[in-house]
Amino acid sequence: MIKFDAAYNMVMDSAFSTGAEEVHFTESAGRILINSVKSDIDMPPFDRSKVDGYACRQADIGKTLLVVEIVAAGMQPQKNIEPGMCSRIMTGAALPSGADFVFMFEESEPAGENMVRYCGKSPRCNISYRAEDVISGEVVLKTGCIIRPQEIAIMAMAGCTKILVGKKARVGIVSTGNELIEPDKKPSATQIRNSNAWQLLAQVERAGGIGKYYGIAADNKESTSKFIETALSENDIVVITGGVSAGDFDLVPGVLGDQGLKMLFDSVAVQPGKPMKLFTGNRKIVFGLPGNPVAAFVQFEVIVRPLIAKMMGATFALSNSINLVLGTDYSRKIADRMAWIPVSLNKLGEVIPLEYHGSGHIASLHEATGLMSVPQGQSWIQKGETVSVRPV
Amino acid sequence: MIKFDAAYNMVMDSAFSTGAEEVHFTESAGRILINSVKSDIDMPPFDRSKVDGYACRQADIGKTLLVVEIVAAGMQPQKNIEPGMCSRIMTGAALPSGADFVFMFEESEPAGENMVRYCGKSPRCNISYRAEDVISGEVVLKTGCIIRPQEIAIMAMAGCTKILVGKKARVGIVSTGNELIEPDKKPSATQIRNSNAWQLLAQVERAGGIGKYYGIAADNKESTSKFIETALSENDIVVITGGVSAGDFDLVPGVLGDQGLKMLFDSVAVQPGKPMKLFTGNRKIVFGLPGNPVAAFVQFEVIVRPLIAKMMGATFALSNSINLVLGTDYSRKIADRMAWIPVSLNKLGEVIPLEYHGSGHIASLHEATGLMSVPQGQSWIQKGETVSVRPV
């Protein structure tokens, strides 16, 4: 049994790149950027007005000014602003030459035919200067970031319509266990419905990968071999649930050994998820996750999901924990493993651990908005202390 | 100009339901659940072993026991456990009648042919009892929740393979402004690239809606009318960017009035996004968002996104702010509006406001992981205080 941090590091060290592919920037949401993006223009590209108002010389503030032109956005100003002149100007329009100041309509008053005057109290110049945000050639998006709506806006502004992103990781899912039936069946007295595979498929999609489910392997070597062999041939990562404890019918380790994969760890000091196993070889990474659905859920989120992100090129925010305040005392009897505890937030935004009967209690995750990590050896956290929570 | 909270409430009050549709549970990730989900079985459905071990009577702990059967998961136990007997049992297998205790392989020792004995130190019973998590007929998923991987697992376990979800809100996007060109073009001296529409499309998708972009309306009444009319006819919500300030070419309010929509507010005491407008009528909701991309981004996240969620049936977590600690002093000169400030987290997990030149500075959002809300009237927040941050 190894410590959680050691297991995490071994998993991340086993990552290989899924490669890159070019996509149109409008199709890139949720992908990982592989090339950095530079702007081909200054931002703003010219001195422009921040408001609807009058462009003039700062020295003329308070004087009566002749309106010489109306400058709309997108139009090239035709008139030079001399002393005593101004142009009526719209938000986003280019500043006329000679002008160094814009006052708002709301701070102007008419002063005769085609004449206006500033009548506000605290003059502000209301100009966005060329290149004040970005200089042409500057990197505006860093390699390894996840592409969100704001990154799409930045690509648009920078004129970068084709980008390289990490290819989606292919993740195969195999369930094991003679007790399992699929959700559309009614279980008999000793059966349970397979929930893990469907949960994991949704987790893979949320992680940005492509999931494929292979079905329930029966608890015999032939069936287990066949399912695993097919899944290995079609995927970068295979996640197998069940069949990884010490039971007489836990065939997974043997079958993977036959396929030339090596077991890097066989259990982890973590709760839930202790029997988790890692196998690698032949450019494949295989996780044996426990059959219990909470354990499978948690270990996918904290171990498999960061691996998928890394393989697709992510260099930022592989684990996205945040520090929040605990809203009630927390204690546990046995602290020989680190723990991930399902939590929700109370109305004050404080962390409240959820009632949780153990690693089969998937219903507890419905109320959960995060997983609180409790370090190995720690059995008590006081209300008001800061805890680390991973949103789920 | 109205306060931000008042604007938010008016927007949310204008929501109407997009209706419901049935989907297979495996296709439901990211949707909003409209019906509640009840379990058709107890969970666990039978008393079962949590571990690989020996099932026996608690009174026999420490005695030498005869192994009468091997019970695999999914199999019906054949033997009754009498005093002095045990069954070898696998994780997830049904507990044989007569047994009320399971000790692990790791805590057992052989005691003659087909005989074992408990040799651990602190006996635990290692049984999950029937219905200890969920009783048949109990509600396991509440109406109005967003469906995440864990909800999919719960549906699977409850045998609920078809569910009702809110229909996706249809959101039309119209850009206005003669200065705009699309991202694949190189701007001339007075033009800028359209980034808002592509950003908003990605934001609509992230919010679970279906976005459609109609293009850039020219700054004349005919073009603006045509674009808006088409967008209104095909969508529940229309988001128009630009054309909403006080400029001579800001035609949007007039055109919407002609379409029979009524303006509910024309500006909001919020930064960025002050010129934001809301129009409703004929079962349509229209937002006039500023052309500045940071303002459009922020107001979509804090106003439009919760509306979309509500219209699709969400009753939980419409605004998902979290309370974090500010890592540096924050101040602003003018505090006449509430503000949403782009922030990132430092290595200690504390909130750091980002350098931010104003509502055109979209590049600042690349580093942003959240928006910190600063109340109207507040110009100063001290390092170490708790602030409210909305993840973006």
Image (cartoon, coloured by chain):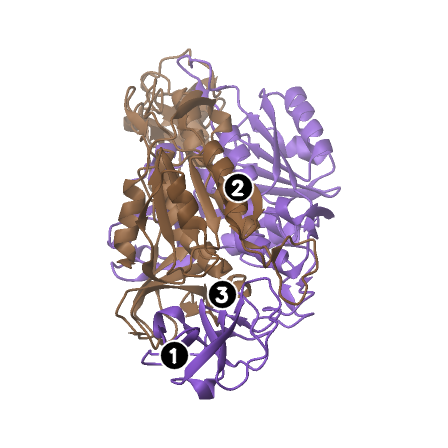
Chain colours: A purple, B brown
Question: Mark 2: which amino acid?
Answer: Phe
The residue positioned 61% from the left and 59% from the top of the image is: A157
Label 1 sits on residue:
A117
Label 3 sits on residue:
A90
Front tag of 1 and 2: 1
* Rendered view: B208 above or below B391: above
Q: Is mark 2 on a helix, strand or loop?
A: helix
Q: What element carries label 3?
A: loop
- Among the 4 quarters of the image, the one containing residue B194: bottom right
Q: Please give left or right for residue A79 compared with residue A191 in the image.
A: right
Front tag of 3 and 1: 1
Nearer to us in this view, A183 or A174:
A183
* Rendered view: B1 above or below A99: above
The residue positioned 37% from the left and 61% from the top of the image is: B274
Q: How crowded is mark 3: few (under 14 residues within 10 Å), some or many (20 or more)?
A: many
Q: Is mark 1 on a helix, strand or loop?
A: strand
Nearer to us in this view, B149 or B45:
B149
The residue positioned 67% from the left and 30% from the top of the image is: A231
Residue A36 picture location, percent across and down:
68, 61
Residue A318 picture location, percent across and down:
55, 55
User: What chain does mark 3 sit on?
Assistant: A
* Rendered view: A41 above or below A169: below
| C-alpha gap between disc 3 and disc 1 | 17 Å
Label 2 sits on residue:
B227
User: What chain does mark 1 sit on?
Assistant: A
Which comes sooner in the sequence, label 3 or label 1?
A: 3
Residue that lies at the very extreme toward the front in this rendered image: A113
Nearer to us in this view, B361 or B261:
B261
